[in-house]
Amino acid sequence: MTIDHPLDADVFDGWLADLVSLRGDRILRAKGIVFLEDIEMPFVFHGVQRTFEPPMPLQSWQGEARQSRIVIIARDISQKRLQSSLNRLRARPVRGARLSTTQE
């Protein structure tokens, strides 16, 4: 999934925390490069199940395209449910709003 607009850091953190809390045992791998509001450098995140490394900044973007790119490989999570969760990051939420993933 790609998202062209910068993400609110708190919204992204909340989304990832909710995903791990509700679906962590089903996540085989999650990784991505994240474009955050008010931050010039990209951040990389990755994890397996409920174990995630803290997001790490990269020195710069490669090329001119600044966008978040997220990959999630999971089992026993419907494509519809996962896409719905990811689509919440595509919306331009009110600054400081939290996103949550709903349980099936």
Image: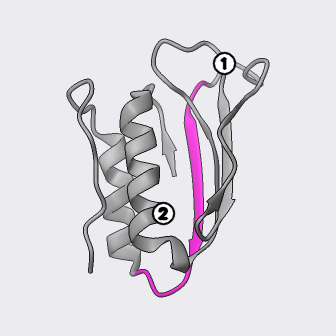
Q: Amino acid at mark 2?
A: Val
Point out residue 71 in the picture as x, y percentages from the top left corner: 60, 58
Q: Residues within 10 Å of mark 2 (few under 14, many from 20)?
A: many
Q: Disc 1 and disc 2: Cα gap in Å? A: 25 Å
Q: Quadrant of residue 72?
A: bottom right
Q: Which residues are magenta?
A: 66-77
Q: Using the image, determine if residue 50 lies above or below residue 41.
A: below
Residue marked by disc 2: 20
Q: Quadrant of residue 35?
A: top right
User: Going 76% across and 26% down the picture, which residue do you hit?
Assistant: 58
* Residue 7 is at least partly visible in this image: no
User: Going 65% across and 31% down the picture, which residue do you hit?
Assistant: 43
31 on left or right of 91: right
User: Going 30% across and 61% down the picture, which residue do you hit?
Assistant: 101
Point out residue 48 in the picture as x, y percentages from the top left corner: 67, 67
Q: Using the image, determine if residue 56 lies above or below residue 77.
A: above
